[in-house]
Image: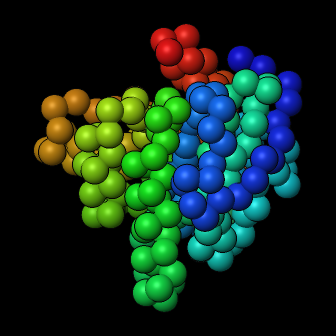
Amino acid sequence: MKITSAEFISSYADANKCPQDGRPEFAFIGRSNVGKSSLINMLTNLKGLAKISSTPGKTQTINHFLINQSWYLVDLPGYGYAKANKTLREGFGKIIEGYFSKRKSLSGLFILIDSRLEPQANDLDFIQWASSLDVPLALVFTKIDKLKRNELQKNLKHYEKTILTRWEEVPTIILTSASETSGRDELLALIEESMKEL
Ligand code: GTP
Ligand code: MG
């Protein structure tokens, strides 16, 4: 699939205010700093579309980007940012929960995982929670440019093994690098397939 247009629509602190036009949407979620906003820029080929920062906690609202005038990419705040103060943490939690309880048009969820890290409890907990949502989900490993090929393979195997101790199967996995534009075609193909099934 080709992206021919991408435009920022708005930021929302309240899921009730998000677009209600019923267009399908695909959301990116994951720990703060994992690279959600960078991935949206990589997919759309527009560097400044989603705001990114090396400091965790940059995205604090729900952000809708209209793609090809027909579907949305959604950038969400990160979870698991230990340094955020309690009010902020609870605020993000509320926004994220509100989003998932309200978005009937959510057609696919991408859970981003930092490929450099050991499986993290909060990611596994989130996968657990998300698998009850009745929305197709895929795991997107980010920042693969930071690892040597054999390190990446080792981490992946370990992750798959960890997943299989909790679940019967491993979800679709996509390997990405926003800085080296890897995994773009795979991600867009998956979105295209999901839209065909709607
Ligand atoms: P929050 O909005 O705070 O939840 O973070 P986020 O998940 O949106 O992460 P963001 O896209 O802002 O990226 C965080 C940092 O990681 C930035 O410094 C990015 O430049 C860097 N980064 C993101 N993706 C990649 C990648 O694929 N490779 C490398 N090397 N760095 C990346
Ligand atoms: Mg962000």
In the displayed structure, does residue 172 sit left or right of residue 186? left
Q: Quadrant of residue 79?
A: bottom left
Place of residue 181 in the rendered image (x, y in percent of width and height, measured from the top left): 72, 39
Report the side of 46 relative to 164 (left or right). Answer: right
Task: Find residue 116 and report its horizontal and vertical position in percent.
Answer: 47, 58
The reply, left or right, for residue 23 in relation to residue 122 is right
Q: Quadrant of the N terminus?
A: top right
Instruction: Report the residue at 50% width, 63% height from top.
Output: 95
Q: Residue at x 47, y 35 (%)?
A: 104
Question: Looking at the image, which is closer to me, 38 or 94?
Answer: 94
Residue 77 placement (x, y as % from top left): 56, 62
Q: Answer whether residue 83 is visible to the viewer in this image.
A: no
**In this rendering, does residue 66 appear at all?**
yes
Residue 57 vertical placement versus 95 (above, below): below
**Residue 90 figure quarter:** bottom left
Q: Quadrant of residue 196?
A: top right
Residue 9 against residue 108 in the figure, above or below: below
* Nearer to the camera, 192 or 13: 13
The percent coordinates of residue 158 (x first, y second) are 28, 47
Q: Is residue 137 above or below residue 125?
A: above
Q: Residue at x 40, y 48 (%)?
A: 101
